[in-house]
Image (spheres, helix red, strand yellow):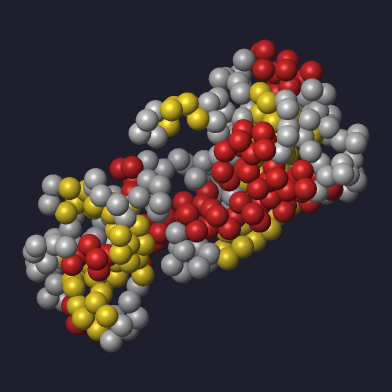
Amino acid sequence: MTRSDSLRIVFMGTPEFAVPSLQQLVSAGYPPVAVVTGPDRRRGRGRKLQASPVKKAAQELGIETLLQPESVKDPEFARQVADLRPDVIVVVAFRILPPAVFESAALGAFNLHGSLLPKYRGAAPIHHAVLSGDAETGVTTFFLKEKVDTGHVIMQRPMDIGPDETTGDVYTRMMHLGAEVVVETVRAIEADRVEEVPQVDELATPAPKVRVPDAQIDWTQPAAVVHNTIRAYSPIPGAWTMLGDRRLKILRSQLPGGESEAEHTERTVGELVVADGPAGQSVAVRCADGLVELVEVQLEGRRAMPARDFVAGLRKRSALILG
C-alpha cells in the first residue's frame, strides 16, 4: 500500500550500496515514480552486458520508469527529470548532479553520505575512516548544493567500527543503516519537520577516491598503521605487498595480543614469521614496532585463502621478506 499518493520521489543510485535504500522506500510506502541508474556495462570475464544492482532491484520491485543517462550533464536528462515533476530526489551512491537536475525537486534533493559530515567529504569516506583507525563513523543525509558534500545536514546516525573490521564489513552494515535514515528523511520532508543544520566548513576533512598505488603496504610503519592499511583497502582495491615478483594482497589481519618489541628486535622489517602456538599456527609480518598477524591473503592469480593455508603451500618459509 502506498503511504503517500501525492509524494513523487525520483530515486538515483547505481551500486549494491543503494539497493537497501530503494527497497526500504518501497516497503515503507514510498515507491519512486522513477529510478535513475548507470547504463548497462560489460562486466566479468565474459564481458557480458549487465545491469546495475539498482536497475535489477527496481525491475524486481516493479518500477517501470528507468532512466540510464550516459551523462548527467546532458540537458535532455535534466528535461526528463523535470518532466517527472519530482517532489523529492533521493540520491544514494550516484554521480555528481548539476543544479539543473537536482533543483527540479519541489521539496528538495538529498544525498546519503557514508560519514558524519563534514568529516570525510569525498568519494571514499569509509576507506578513510578505517585507514585513520576511527572507532566511530556514521551516515548523513543532506540537501544537495552545487559544491559536493557541503549541503545542510538533515539527519545523522552514528555507528561503531570494530578494531578488526574492514571497509567491506563497514560498507555492508552501513548500507542497511543508511536505508533506515533515507526513509526517516523522506518522512521528515513529507511532514515539513526538517531542521537543517549548516556544515562547519572549517571542520571538513577530505576523503578522495582511493587508488591501487595508495594500497601498497609499508612494513616500516608501526603495526597499528599497517593493520589499519590492510583493513581500509579490503576488499577493494586490496592492500598489497610483493612476494618475490608476484603481488600478494592481504585481505584481513589482526594485532596479536601481548606482542613485545624486545622479543622481535632480531627480525627484519617485512619478514614473514610463522610460529606454532596454543591456538595453532600463526602467520605474521614484522613491522616497525612488532608484528601484524595475517588472517586472509590472496596471491596474484589465485583465490583468497587463510594465511596459514597459503604458507603451508610455500616451498620456502624461512627468511621470506615482503615488500
Q: Quadrant of residue 292?
A: bottom left
Q: Quadrant of the N terminus?
A: top right
The x, y position of residue 156, in whole percent, is 70, 54
The x, y position of residue 183, in whole percent, is 77, 48
Residue 232: in sight, yes or no? yes
Residue 196: in sight, yes or no? no
Q: Quadrant of residue 211?
A: top left
The x, y position of residue 218, in whole percent, is 26, 56
**Which residue is nearer to you in this view: 123 or 61?**
61
Q: Quadrant of the C terminus?
A: bottom left
Q: Is residue 113 above or below residue 47?
A: below
- Whether residue 246 sits left or right of residue 175 in the image: it is left
Q: How many marks?
A: 0
- Whether residue 35 sits left or right of residue 166 in the image: it is right
**Which residue is nearer to you in this view: 187 or 196?**
187
At x 55%, y 31%, the residue is 51
At x 87%, y 41%, the residue is 2
Q: Quadrant of residue 259?
A: bottom left
At x 68%, y 58%, the residue is 157
At x 61%, y 51%, the residue is 175
Q: Residue furthest top?
A: 76
The x, y position of residue 85, in whole percent, is 82, 24
Q: Residue furthest bottom?
A: 278
Q: Is residue 12 above or below residue 248?
A: above
